Every structure is written in C-alpha cells, then in structure tokens.
Amino acid sequence: MTIFKEIVDEQYLTVAEAKELLADIETERALDEEREMRYELARAIEHVNRFSAMSGDDARALVEELEELEKVNEATAHKIADLLPRDRDEVRSVFSQSRYSLDGDELDEILNVVAKYA
C-alpha cells in the first residue's frame, strides 16, 4: 500500500528566509528534550547558517525589487538573492538556461540592485 501526498501549496524561499524558519524549528526542538533533531534537519540548519548572507527581511526586499525588473521572474529573483552575484559573468550564469540573453545595461541594472543589499 502506497500513501501519496498531495502538494497543497508551493512557494520560493531564499536561503535567508529558510534560515529564519529553521531557526524557529531548532528552538522548538531544543525546548522539547525528548525529541532529537534528525540528521537531515541538522544538516539543513548547518547549510543555511553557512550560506546565508543577509537577513530574511533584506532578502525579501531584494527579491521584490528584482521582480520589478523586466526580465527577472520569481524563480530567477530568488536565485539571484541566494547567490548575490558580483559581476556580469555571475549574473549571466544565472540566466544561462533562459530563452533570452541580457545586454550590458540589463546586467548592470541587476548588479546595481544587488549592490544595495550585499
């Protein structure tokens, strides 16, 4: 017998937002002495602590500002917020699987937005 789970809701999160959520879970587990933290959860917490470069509020603001740009969709905005690219080549690598390429002005516009938060 197989139990299937249904996806009820789905949303993108930046690493910084995931860090906030996992910190709440970590605190909750620390209060309950009988519940141990699973290996996967401990590794996820370690990962977000290592790679989170900003606060969740700043990450949300960065994503919102990036989504206002013409060729940046929600998924790409979250990737950019996680990676915080510093030059044109790094921004191009984020868009490498897109159907369109960005010109120098568009790349600079993205880099200027990222520079405000990095």
Image (cartoon, rainbow, N blue to C red):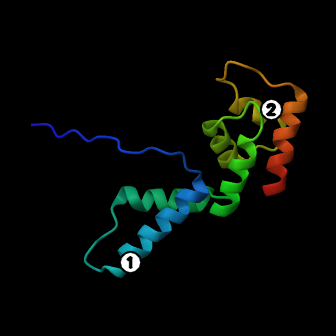
Residue furthest toward the top? 99
User: Is residue 90 visible in this depiction of the protein?
Assistant: yes
Q: Which is nearer the N-term, disc 1 or disc 2?
A: 1
Secondary structure under badge 1? helix
Q: Which residue is mark 2?
A: 89
What residue is at 71 percent from the left and 34 percent from the top?
72
Where's residue 15, x and y in %?
Answer: 58, 53
User: Is residue 118 visible in this depiction of the protein?
Assistant: no
What residue is at 50 percent from the left and 45 percent from the top?
11
Estimate how packed mark 2 is, as few (under 14), some (14 to 19) or many (20 or more) residues with alpha carbons within 10 Å: few
Residue 91 numbered tag:
none
Secondary structure under badge 2? helix
Figure check: 19 above or below 92: below
Where's residue 19, x and y in %?
Answer: 54, 61
What residue is at 49 percent from the left and 63 percent from the top?
21
Left or right of 59 in this view: 27: left
Q: Which residue is mark 1?
A: 30
Residue furthest toward the right? 105
